[in-house]
Amino acid sequence: MALSSLVLPYYSVGALVVPITEELGWTRAQFQTAILFSSGLGVITSPIVGWLCDRYGARRVALPSILGLTLGFVLAASQNGALWMLYLAYAVMAVLGAGTIPVTWTRAITTNFFKQRGLALGLALTGTGICGVLIPQYATWLVEIAGWRGAYVGIALLPLLIALPLVFFGFRPRERHHHDDQAVAAPHETGLTLKQATRGYRFWVLLLSIFVVYMALSGIGANLYPAVTDAGMSNSNAATVMSVFGGAIIFGRLLVGYLVDKFWAPAVASISMLLPTIGCWLMIDPQNFWAAATAAALLGLAAGAELDLMSFLAAKYFGLKHYAKIYAVLYMALATCSGTAPLLFATVYDRAGSYSVGFMIALGLFLVGAATVLLLGRYPPEGSLEAAGAKTSNTLPGS
């Protein structure tokens, strides 16, 4: 997860935006548009990945995708200053690296863990936080010693040398392939079809809450580094703030993963979405490094919670039988935000000359998400999903 096409391009972009735009004369919005092609193309690829994982298994999908992600970073290093070449490189990261997105890894977790699924998801998804801690520091160091082209090459080596052997030798989850009639389904594998899920209001409630919160988080995460340096702090301080952000993601993953196993998950989600409103308020006019670091910690907690919650809530309310397909469609909302929010946030900066307006908008989005997720209502009764079908998913909260 730490070296996936969702987070590796995203968390490296902050350290690259200033040196690249200054050398090539692009605006920050033009450069941040590259994220639209990496994360944003997940809107198209995620349903395909979900289908492939259901049919062929997560391992077979992940292995070639790691090589595809590496190729995308190599292309980014070799681009000659034409924007289309930059966008092509990030598109290759998304399309050829599609099998490294959370659909692949969370499917393996949800079909192998049951009693403490929330904690298992939290542990697995801490990879995104590890990326947030290490990659900004690593990318900043690479830029200083080898320039931005060398930084791209150094980042390209990570999936090849770390993720590929880990997955090849260690990633062998229990699978049920739909093309294999002799395969044995994992225990507790019941649930709604994608069509049944989308007929119910809960699917759309979850989709909306994911969309507004991730729109805020995606816009902030890719622009937090330049927002800190624009406030007069050094590159090293900005990289440290990003590491605080990533560390809070790890803590948020584990904390939320533990809490959703114990308490009603929508309440946990709502509280986690309220915390970053304080962080946004602090970043409207950050007075010093400690204010920025505190804001990053609060924002990181929310970022750490979001993927955990989406995975857990999808499995809890819609079941496991068609989890990969349902999760993949929900992931489309997340991918849309990951691709468009950095560009929108940077565009607001280009027009306003400040990130303050963007942080105020993000604050409002967090409030909407915190209120919306509470509408999910009680969990469906155990064992009822397959029998009740769409009827269960359409029961109103509290009824």
Image (tube, helix red, strand yellow):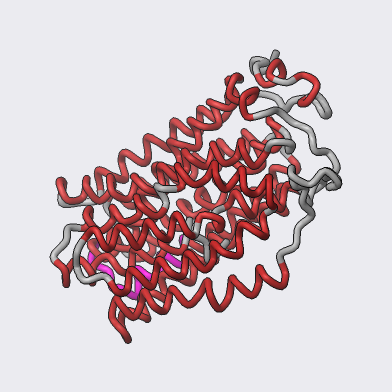
**Residue drawn where x is 34% and y is 45% of the image:** 340
Q: Position of residue 147 (x, y in %)?
A: 28, 81
Q: What x and y, as percent, mark residue 323?
A: 67, 39
| Visible residue check, residue 282 | no
382 on left or right of 221: right
Instruction: Single out the residue that lies furthest toward the top.
Output: 399
- Look at the image and tell me in which quarter the C terminus lies: top right
Q: Main secondary structure of the magenta part?
A: helix
Given residues 118 and 299, the one toward you in this image is 118
Between 113 and 160, the one nearer to me in the picture? 160
Tell me: residue 43, above or below residue 15.
above
Q: Going by the image, does 189 lie left or right of 333?
A: right
How far from the left and from the top, in percent, is residue 3? 53, 66
Where are the magenta residues, as a range?
Answer: 231-245
* Front residue (pair 199, 92): 92
Residue 364 vs 253, above or below: the answer is above
Could you say which quadrant of the image residue 337 lies in?
top left
Is 123 inside the magenta-drawn segment? no
Residue 207 visible, this orientation: yes
Nearest the viewer among 264 and 292 is 264
Q: Position of residue 225 (x, y in %)?
A: 33, 63
Q: Is residue 23 above or below residue 105?
A: below
Report the residue at 32% width, 59% height from top: 88
* Picture layout, residue 68 above or below residue 279: below
Q: Quadrant of the N terminus?
A: bottom right
Quadrant in the picture for residue 18: bottom left
Residue sitting at x 27%, y 52%: 285
Say whether residue 130 is left or right of residue 155. right
Which residue is at a point 30% across and 58% down the rendered structure image?
87
Total residue callouts:
0
